[in-house]
Amino acid sequence: MARLSRSLLVTNPDAAGIDIGSSSHFVAVPSDRDEVSVREFSSLTCDLQAIATWLKICRVRTVAMESTGVYWIALYELLEAQGFEVLLVNARHVKNVSGRKSDVLDCQWLQQLHSYGLLQGAFRPTEAVCALRSLSRQRSMLLRGQGRCVQHMQKALTQMNVQLANVISDIVGVTGQKIIRALVAGQRDAWVLADMKNARIQASRADIAKSLQGNWRTEHLFALQQALAAFDFHGQQLAECDTAIETQLQALHLYTGEPGKAKKRSNTRNAPKFDLRVQLFKVCGVDLTRINGIDVSTALIVLSEIGPDLSRFTSVKHFTSWLGLCPGTKISGGKQLSGKTKRTANRAAQALKLAAAALKSSQSALGAYYRRMCARLDKAKAVTAAAHKLARLIYFMLTKGEEYTDQGQDYFEERYKERVLRQLQKRAEKLGMRLSPAENVA
């Protein structure tokens, strides 16, 4: 047996390490490049420029930095624009060796590991996709803010004992908005307010009038007025954000043509007002909404997080592992200790889990798969398993340009029956027995 070498081979001699902080950054370069190989720089823009200048003087080609909050973004973008190869590494993967507590040692440790080629950079899409991702995350934040405004309106109505939310399902729908705006404008006649109900509202006019009899205290009306104004303000900002998203999607167009007919009409109220499905098709060349459970909003979140180019992921297994949707491989001594998926805050994975949960009543092959998983596993694991399947479908659509065609629930059930029969036949053969179909009973 050949004797293993105890020395590591330096593969990146021109490597530097940076420990990111909120107010200052510690930078380490190879010890032979400067008399002071470790320096501290402020997080001001002029000092970030000084970091790039010093790295060029020290003939550094590649840089590794820890991912700490959002403090790394400005320096990362600046160094990348200056022509450096920048790796954003996970702090958990770097700090497996104890005894290195100070910031100076952290940056030196990063530089040493990177010089040996032991660090792997995190996935980061192109600049254009990063811009789309920022806009998409801003839109999600605005939607959450608008949802809080709805809760504030419900609270103000409840404090006035106006039980409108108990007779109509959505107080920010057409009927709810008309009634609330009339209340803020000064209308108090319950029957006049009840006449504003839409034809699709199942509650009777009398029930709505009864729910609109409140105490009309001034402080609660003031809270309702401010919550409504905040709701409208968030709606205006959402419209502006949608315009910016549409412009950014047009800058990402790589394909021409139009997608096929939509599978079904989308009634998502929070979706952008422009034709998002067409814009996403021109970005990636396939219609992700053909996959059951994935609507235009989910497709926007997924594409803004990963982009149309998945060449960084060598296989579908690497892609699902990055999403945190594949089973864990915690093995010791040849024994698997746990197959639990890792905890992750990946927004694309969260969107796919929500899409998977929506398959509960879907009469499709994916819906049948989700219900089959629910019968075998608990709901959380079934959602993760269905989200894993959605991620695989998205990977193959983006990498191979294949359109997804649903085979239907019956097709899935028939294939499941065939698999069960094959397994039973194998077990019967091992026991020296043979399966035979039961005779049809008249």
Image: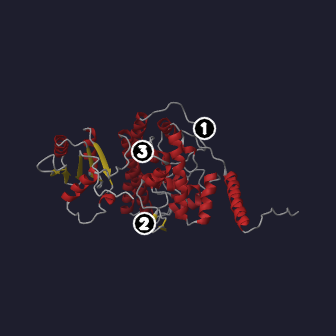
- The secondary structure type at the circle numbered 3 is loop
Q: Is residue 285 above or below residue 394?
A: above
Answer above or below: position of 96 versus 36.
below
Question: Judging from the image, what secondary structure is the residue with disc 1 in?
Answer: loop
Residue that extends furthest to the top in the rendered view of this protein? 256
- The way the protein has been coloured in the rendering is secondary structure
| Nearer to us in this view, 56 or 23 | 56
Answer with the quarter of the image where residue 321 lies.
bottom left
Q: Quadrant of the C terminus?
A: bottom right
Which of label 3 and label 2 is nearer to you? 3
Rendered view: 88 above or below 277: below
**Left or right of 119 on screen, residue 407:** right
**347 left or right of 44?**
right
* Front residue (pair 304, 400): 400
Identity of the residue drawn at 62% across and 54% down: 362
At 70% from the left edge and 62% from the top edge, which residue is drawn? 426
Hey, what amino acid is under mark 2? Gln
Residue located beneath label 1 in the image = 261
On the image, the x and y values in percent for residue 159 come to 42, 66
For disc 2, the neighbor class at 10 Å (few under 14, some 14 to 19, many from 20) is: some
- Whichever of labels 3 and 2 marks the residue nearer the N terminus, that label is 2
Task: Write down the residue under mark 2.
Answer: 159
Residue labelled with disc 3: 312
Query: In whole angstroms, how far apart are the C-alphas of marks 3 and 2?
Result: 54 Å
